[in-house]
Image (spheres, helix red, strand yellow):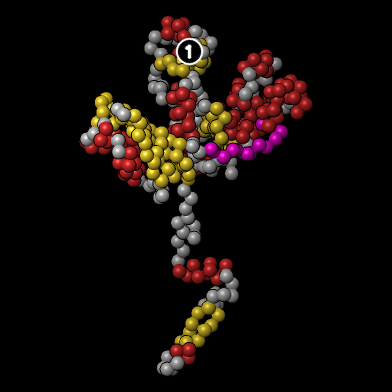
Amino acid sequence: MPIVAIHFIPFAFHNLPEDQPRVSLKEGRALHVCEKAAALGVTQDMPESAVRLRATDAKIVQDSSPELSRQWQDFLLQVFHFSPNVESLREGVCLITCSAYDAHQIQHQFGCPVGVGDTREQALIAATVATRSRVRTVLDFDAFSQEVPITSLSVLGIKQETLERLSWLGVTTLGDLKTWSRKQIQHYFGIEARPIIGLFFEKNVWVARYNLPKEIISSFSFESPVQEPCDIDPALKRMGEHLFQKLSGLHPRKLVLTAGTPIGNLWSSRNVKDPVQKQDTLQHLMRLALDDSFAVQFGIEKLEVRLMDLYQLGEQKTLFQQKPSSKDAVKLVHQRFAGVMFHYQIHDPFSQARDQRFQKLPFDEEE
């Protein structure tokens, strides 16, 4: 099965409008600059004050933040639907083991650059030259390497200074670097040679399995303590929608509800015995847990719900891949249990003895 790479770099731009200049900051300096911001004179490593002077209308975001990390984990959880093998290399870059059809589905659903290759390194390089509207697949690596610029090696962890030295030597594409021997690459790149050797001389196809989150949390705060169902039920419904969306096909084994009241926090828990298939089921469980906490009589200031011990439901709806006809089903059973099946044939319909009316015969597939 091919390896699919998602190259959502910079991930901080994924929620920003593309028709405006965009700049991401790290430690107060510009890290990623879009083309429109670069046209206004914004460059990498420029201080934030200079960025705001050059591009007054630019959308400026932090390259790393707790909110951005949470959004990336939510994205990985949605991609988990396509394959259990989802490996996050860093925020914005991940590897998946899935079919080429699923790769096109991911690109269409999330609108991100997707690359498909036979190895980890090939898929990552293909993702760097892919677009948001087209999946890039590596069919012939020799021809593909002639088209890819040497700057694409940055996705493998090669430093910018090393890429500039290669350009000074006249190495502008991967095809130019592919003519080097293994010893030449090891001597020139040193500690950075490992991913390049994997790209040209090895076949790394292993993708780690995705670690499911331990718990999913949702909370809601009221402006003042509430006791009436007309105030509590809409909050439970909103939290249920948020939790059900974040579950994204997973199922919890335990629900813990904490209610903040004027006398302190009251909590209760519920064991979820059946898979949560509908949002209404989750909302009903939260209501039962709230009743168990006896917090309504004191007034509720804040609600927090934790879904714990998550698991993925494995089910097989039928024994066969598709529903066969009765004749095909009999043949399949006969092939699996040869010589065991038999059938009855009318022998003497007027006999008073039951065992004489029918005759037991071995099953013949030709009949």
Q: Residues within 10 Å of mark 1 (few under 14, many from 20)?
A: some
> Residue drawn 46% across and 48% down?
313
> Residue drawn 42% across and 43% down?
254
- State the image quarter where residue 281 is shown: top left
Q: Is residue 40 visible?
A: yes
- State the image quarter where residue 279 is shown: top left
Front-lying residue, 242 or 272: 272
Tag 1 residue: 38
**Where does the image place residue 7, in percent across and percent down from the top left?**
53, 29
In the image, residue 10 sits, relative to residue 73, either above or below, namely: above
Query: How many numbered callouts?
Result: 1
**Where does the image place residue 292, in percent across and percent down from the top left?**
32, 42
Which residue reaches farthest front? 263
**Where does the image place residue 346, in percent across and percent down from the top left?**
46, 87
- State the image quarter where residue 208 is shown: top right
> Residue drawn 57% across and 30% down?
89
Front-lying residue, 10 or 325: 10
Q: Is residue 43 visible?
A: no
Front-lying residue, 83 or 148: 83
**Where does the image place residue 287, in percent across and percent down from the top left?**
31, 41
User: What's the magenta bit mostly, secondary-structure-wise?
Assistant: loop
Which span of residues is magenta-colored? 199-211
Q: Please name the amino acid that badge 1 sits on.
A: Ala
Element on which disc 1 rests: helix
Is residue 126 on the magenta stretch?
A: no
The N terminus is located in which quarter? top right
Which residue reaches farthest right? 183
Residue 70 vs residue 287: left or right? right
In the image, residue 12 sits, relative to residue 343, either above or below, namely: above
Residue 238 vs residue 108: left or right? left
> Residue drawn 48% across and 50% down?
314
Residue 189 vs residue 96: left or right? right
